[in-house]
Amino acid sequence: MKIDILTLFPEMFDGFKSESIIKRAIDNKKVEINTCNFRTFSKDKHNKVDDTPYGGGAGMVLMCQPIFDAVESLRTEKSKVILLSPQGKKYNQKKAYELSNEEHLIFICGHYEGFDERIKTICDEEISIGDYVLTGGELPAMILTDSIVRLLPGVIQEESCTNESFNGNLLDYPTYTKPREYKGMKVPEVLLSGNHKKIDDWRKSEQVRITKEKRPDLVESKYSLIKQGIKKNVRKITIDDVKNIKVTEIKEKENKKYKVEKTYELIAITIFNPKNLHGYKLKGKSSDSLTKILIVKKEFYTKVAFKNVSKKINILSQRLKLALNDKNNDYTTKVLSEAQILKDTIIACYSSYLSSTALNEVINKIDYLVNEFVKIKTTNL
Ligand SMILES: C[S@@+](CC[C@H](N)C(=O)[O-])C[C@H]1O[C@@H](n2cnc3c(N)ncnc32)[C@H](O)[C@@H]1O
């Protein structure tokens, strides 16, 4: 991979390129990182690169010409040009994976008040590293470069990448090192057990627990995507709305009707025309918004959930097989991102219905399929 960084302050990258993993990646020819001072492309006799904004206002604006010419001199068919800007799409690990598959990246670092708007026409993407404003695009360019380079094959141990935070939208599991006890705080027993299966299971469940606790948005965002899929005419009702609802069952015996009131654990709800309602009356806070309740035993739902999940994993496995023959990697990227979404969905929507063993089993299966796929794909390169 080659990364060209267009900046007015190339020296800022000297330290970045000469330390630690980035230095090693450059030395081992896993990546080539060049800085290009776009001031050298200015056609102005004083090498000017910015000017005052039309319409007035504070600050200076980067002009089109030096940046257009600098990009032109570097761009090939395989280049992806990225403008670093607080107005861009927010960067995340998924984007880092996506960009790590590119052959050539060109980052444009802004400064001062920002860019002439027309510069955006030569960029493929606009990326922000977060909702705050920095003085220039140099730190964002370093952040993108660092997160991408460490994903390149052979830069760091593959296992480190696959285990860490944000893979499959989960945060990393807790880690400990020597001593076993420090100031009364003990390392969890399971990590000292030597039982790798148990350790793996513990780590997976800790990942789910920690993500739900610290970054519920990571798992909920996928859930809301699924919710959007629900038909428009169906009101959004969560299981919590109707959890302890009382259900009056009307039974008939020898032509006599009698009522049996029970509190069911409601697992699934469906809504349909109230005219079709027979046999059940609903009591409870949300009963007015319900027309039908489907009452399912937890064991039954667990079985159905496992079956559904297994079906989805089989489809994923078939799609990964197809992706083995994919030449230009577009399909591969799509299927790998589907694998991540499947993991997120299982965690967001099925984790309360599957036992922790079943949950671990399905997550492990997806990880195994993806890892095997990546192994075969890289040996075939
Ligand atoms: C002071 S900022 C310009 C901000 C601009 N006036 C605005 O409000 O959108 C100067 C440059 O720093 C970079 N920059 C600042 N914050 C950034 C962020 N959160 N993500 C990516 N780049 C950023 C961009 O290249 C930007 O052009």
Image (tube, rainbow, N blue to C red):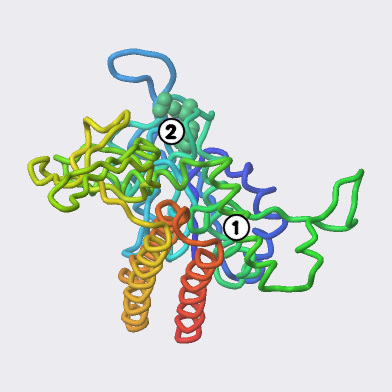
Q: Label 1 sits on what residue type?
A: Ser
**Helix, strand or loop for disc 2:** strand
Q: Nearer the viewer, residue 304 or 167?
A: 304
Residue 197 left/right relative to 112: right
Q: Who is closer to the viewer here, 145 or 54?
A: 145
- Would residue 181 be found to the left or right of residue 265 on screen? right
The residue shown at (28%, 14%) is 55
Image coordinates of residue 277 in percent, x first then y, are 13, 44
What residue did someone put label 1 on? 205
How far is the residue under mark 1 from the one under mark 2? 36 Å
Read off the residue under disc 2: 86
Q: Amino acid at mark 2?
A: Pro
Which residue reaches farthest bottom? 380
Q: Position of residue 175 (x, y in %)?
A: 73, 55
Q: Residues within 10 Å of mark 1 (few under 14, many from 20)?
A: some
Residue 110 makes an appearance in the image: no
Q: Is residue 320 above or below residue 347?
A: below
Of labels 1 and 2, earlier in sequence is 2
> How far from the left and from the top, in percent, is residue 32?
55, 63
Report if residue 5 is visible in the image.
Answer: yes
> Considering only vertical position in the picture, is 374 above or below 353?
below
Would you identify the image quadrant in which residue 236 lies? Answer: top left
| Label 2: few (<14), some (14–19) or many (≥20) C-alpha neighbours in 10 Å | some
